[in-house]
Image (tube, helix red, strand yellow):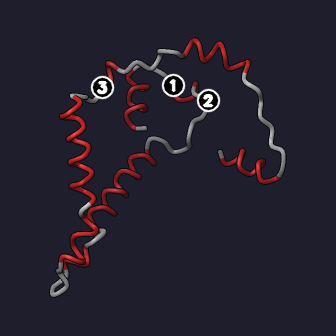
Amino acid sequence: YLRFYHGLRHHGVDRDTLPYKAPLQPFLAYFAVCFCLVVALFNGFDAFFPGRFSAKTFVPPYVDIPIFLSLFLGYKFVKGTRFVKVAEMDIWSGKAEIDRLEPTWPVVTPRNWVERIWFWIA
């Protein structure tokens, strides 16, 4: 979301023009990134207390970090992909067609109270 948000800002697109605008964004997205990093880093913190360090308390909480990084960076290296720069983001391809087809989509109305709640949430 953060890359999309910065791409919109760079191209001068106001968030109010989007069909849905989540409240408190992008601040909640930054908070989520920070929170996930804190959880990932402190997940196995009890392994560092004196007399408690063992492979059973250290490896499981932290093994996912190098696995994720090696898979992510390995894919980037093998496939030769790169991050798209904000200035090079193409946010307009296909928009005219979607805008043309959108009025033809059926309007879905809730059939019961569960769907009413779900449609309100989603």
Q: Amino acid at mark 3?
A: Val
- Nearer the observer, disc 3 or disc 2? 3
* Lateral position of residue 51 relative to residue 107, left or right: left
* Lateral position of residue 65 relative to residue 108, left or right: left
Residue 51's quadrant in the figure? bottom left
Q: Which residue is mark 1?
A: 14
Residue 57 vs residue 40, the one in the foreground: 57
* Lateral position of residue 88 relative to residue 114, left or right: left
* Total labels drawn: 3
| Disc nearer the start of the sequence (1/3) | 1
Q: Secondary structure at mark 2?
A: loop
Q: Amino acid at mark 2?
A: Pro
Say which mark, if any, is on residue 84: 3
> Badge 1: few (under 14), some or many (20 or more) residues near its Cα, within 10 Å?
few
Inter-mark Cα distance, 2 to 1: 11 Å
Residue found at x 43% / y 38%: 1
The percent position of residue 21, horizontal first and vertical second, equals 57, 36
Q: Which residue is mark 2?
A: 19
Residue found at x 78% / y 48%: 116
> Badge 3: few (under 14), some or many (20 or more) residues near its Cα, within 10 Å?
few
| Disc nearer the start of the sequence (2/1) | 1
- Nearer the observer, disc 1 or disc 3? 3
Inter-mark Cα distance, 3 to 2: 24 Å
Q: Amino acid at mark 1?
A: Asp
The percent position of residue 90, horizontal first and vertical second, equals 40, 18
Q: Secondary structure at mark 3?
A: loop
Residue 66 vs residue 92, the one in the foreground: 66
* Lateral position of residue 104 relative to residue 83, left or right: right
User: Do labels 1 and 3 touch, CB within 8 Å?
Assistant: no
Q: Secondary structure at mark 1?
A: loop
Inter-mark Cα distance, 1 to 3: 21 Å
> Badge 2: few (under 14), some or many (20 or more) residues near its Cα, within 10 Å?
few
